[in-house]
Amino acid sequence: MFVLPSLWNLIISTFVFIIAAKYLHIFLDGKGLAKGMARGTLVFAVAYLLSWGSGEMVDWTQEKIGIAQPAAQNPDDLQQLLNIITSAVTPETLEQGSK
């Protein structure tokens, strides 16, 4: 089943991406690699992989210490939500909203 990433995963992987991209730019400047499309793509790819890996480590750590992650909603829950919304929107409420 599809599991949404945890909030810690999103926060930490975002910080890792920003820090990795900054240091990769500094490292490549020191090596004398000219700025351009290839360099930008390289920085993005490496920063993305480091970010993804850190997010996976966060999720793995949370799984090992027993913090449950919310699973995606199943279609029954979504159908029930849709029924509630459509029952709340009636012709009378639409007429009242347009006045």
Image (cartoon, helix red, strand yellow):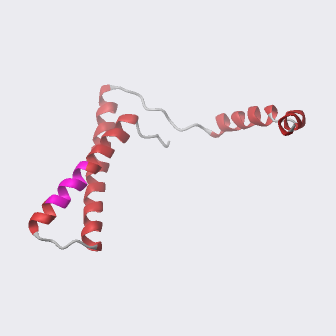
Query: 84 or 76: nearer the eye?
Result: 84
Up/down of 44 relative to 64, above or below:
below
Query: 58 or 27: nearer the eye?
Result: 27
Q: Residue at x 28, y 33 (%)?
A: 61
Residue 56 appears anywhere in the view = no
Q: Quadrant of the C terminus?
A: top right
Up/down of 45 relative to 94, above or below:
below
* Residue that protrudes farthest toward the front in the picture: 99
Q: Main secondary structure of the magenta part?
A: helix
Q: How many marks?
A: 0
Q: Residue at x 37, y 27 (%)?
A: 67
Queried whether the magenta region covers residue 17, the answer comes back as: no
* 92 lies left or right of 15: right
Q: Residue at x 22, y 71 (%)?
A: 35
Give how far across and how far down residue 47 sits, in percent: 27, 55
Queried whether the magenta region covers residue 20, the answer comes back as: yes
* Residue that protrudes farthest toward the top in the picture: 66
Which residues, given as a range, are shown in magenta?
19-26
Query: 34 or 53: nearer the eye?
Result: 34
Q: Quadrant of residue 5?
A: top left
Q: Quadrant of residue 42?
A: bottom left
Q: Residue at x 30, y 30 (%)?
A: 64
Give how far across and how far down residue 29 sits, in percent: 14, 65
Residue 4 appears anywhere in the view = yes
Give how far across and how far down residue 8 sits, in percent: 35, 35
